[in-house]
Image (cartoon, grey):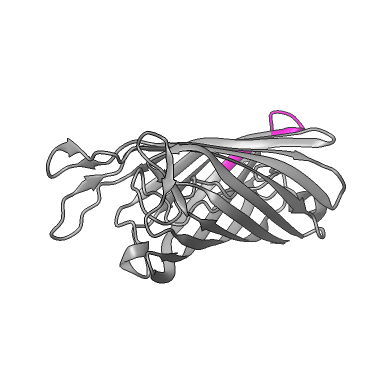
């Protein structure tokens, strides 16, 4: 497996997932990215039977959340508007084990960064840290199938950027390669612990289901245009103190977009994309651009 091949096989997540990952159903005036919504084409086009190597990925996105979807799915002006910029710095170590042939493994450490401007206020800093493994195999030479799971810490450099609960992101991942086209994506869930803060009610975020699909055209060795489809459905929040559901906290969003991937060299690629909400409920709309820089070394 040479570097040219591996540089196209650029993994997992969290892609970026996600500024403040799970606001499971919670509304706000700033952006609420769909889980793992920042992945690009070939995210899960992964090798097996390779020598260990490392990848550094920097994700970034900006969202102009000037509108939101209400509980009836109608698009309305968001109070105060809102702009958010977020990033994720990801280090991944890939390796295999002689005792488990034809299976690839990766371990990731991801740090979230965020900056928001809304309602005349601005703030920024570090969000939770994300860690976890992934494993995959190749049913045939053209396809990949696997599983990834990540724990997200409740911490942040400031209160507004901390979730105050532990959460887990797990998903099935897949990829299929044709000569001139590529199709990959994921389907997964996010579950979270109960949120406890001194002097406040205890809240349990609803379970989140999500999917991210990428279909690309291998136009040239350098340029690869692609179509993106993202979907997320979040269950409502439950007030453990009052023993009742919190109204208008379940949410849904579907977004689609177009992007392009530049395979600059054997070990460097840059991906850019624009996406917009198609429909939603109880959530700020997506009107966002995404950037991704990848560097691979052994």
Quadrant for residue 178, please give it: top right
- Residue depicted at x 36% and y 44%: 24
| For residue 138, above or below residue 38 | above
Residue occupying the far top of the picture = 139
Q: Where is residue 157 in the image (x, y as percent from the top left)?
A: 37, 70
Front residue of 286/165: it is 286
- State left or right for residue 219 relative to residue 46: right
- Residue depicted at x 21% and y 54%: 196
Q: Would residue 111 be visible to someone looking at this image? A: no
Front residue of 86/89: it is 86
Q: What's drawn in magenta, residue-wise? A: 135-143
Q: Quadrant of the C terminus?
A: bottom right
Is 142 included in the stretch rendered in magenta?
A: yes
- State left or right for residue 176 relative to residue 178: left
- Residue depicted at x 43% and y 52%: 21
Front residue of 98/50: it is 50
Is 176 included in the stretch rendered in magenta?
A: no
- State left or right for residue 90 relative to residue 117: right
Q: Position of residue 66 (x, y in %)?
A: 47, 54
Q: Where is residue 100 in the image (x, y as percent from the top left)?
A: 61, 39
């Amino acid at each position: 497996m040479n570097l040219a091949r591996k540089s196209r096989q650029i993994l997992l997540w969290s892609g970026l997932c996600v500024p403040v990952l799970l606001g499971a159903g919670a509304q706000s005036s700033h952006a609420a990215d769909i889980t793992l919504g920042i992945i690009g084409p070939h995210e899960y086009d992964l090798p097996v039977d390779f020598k260990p190597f490392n990848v550094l990925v920097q994700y970034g996105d900006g969202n102009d959340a000037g509108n939101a979807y209400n509980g009836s799915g109608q698009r309305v002006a968001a109070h105060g508007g809102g702009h958010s910029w977020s990033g994720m710095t990801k280090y991944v170590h890939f390796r295999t084990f002689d005792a488990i042939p034809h299976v690839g493994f990766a371990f990731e450490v991801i740090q979230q960064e965020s900056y928001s401007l809304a309602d005349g206020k601005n703030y920024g800093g570090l969000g939770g840290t994300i860690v976890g493994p992934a494993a995959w195999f190749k049913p045939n030479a053209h396809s990949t199938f696997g599983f990834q799971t990540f724990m997200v810490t409740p911490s942040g450099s400031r209160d507004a950027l901390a979730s105050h609960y532990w959460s887990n992101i797990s998903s099935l991942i897949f990829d299929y390669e044709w000569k001139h086209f590529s199709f990959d994506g994921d389907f997964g869930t996010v579950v979270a612990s109960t949120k406890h803060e001194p002097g406040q009610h205890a809240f349990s975020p609803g379970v989140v289901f999500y999917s991210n699909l990428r279909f690309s055209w291998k136009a040239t060795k350098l340029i690869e245009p692609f179509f993106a489809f993202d979907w997320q459905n979040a269950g409502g929040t439950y007030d453990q103190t009052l023993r009742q559901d919190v109204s208008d906290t379940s949410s849904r969003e579907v977004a689609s977009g177009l992007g392009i991937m530049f395979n600059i060299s054997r070990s460097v690629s840059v991906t850019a994309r624009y996406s917009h909400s198609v429909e939603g409920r109880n959530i700020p709309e997506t009107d966002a651009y995404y950037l991704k820089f990848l560097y691979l070394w052994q």
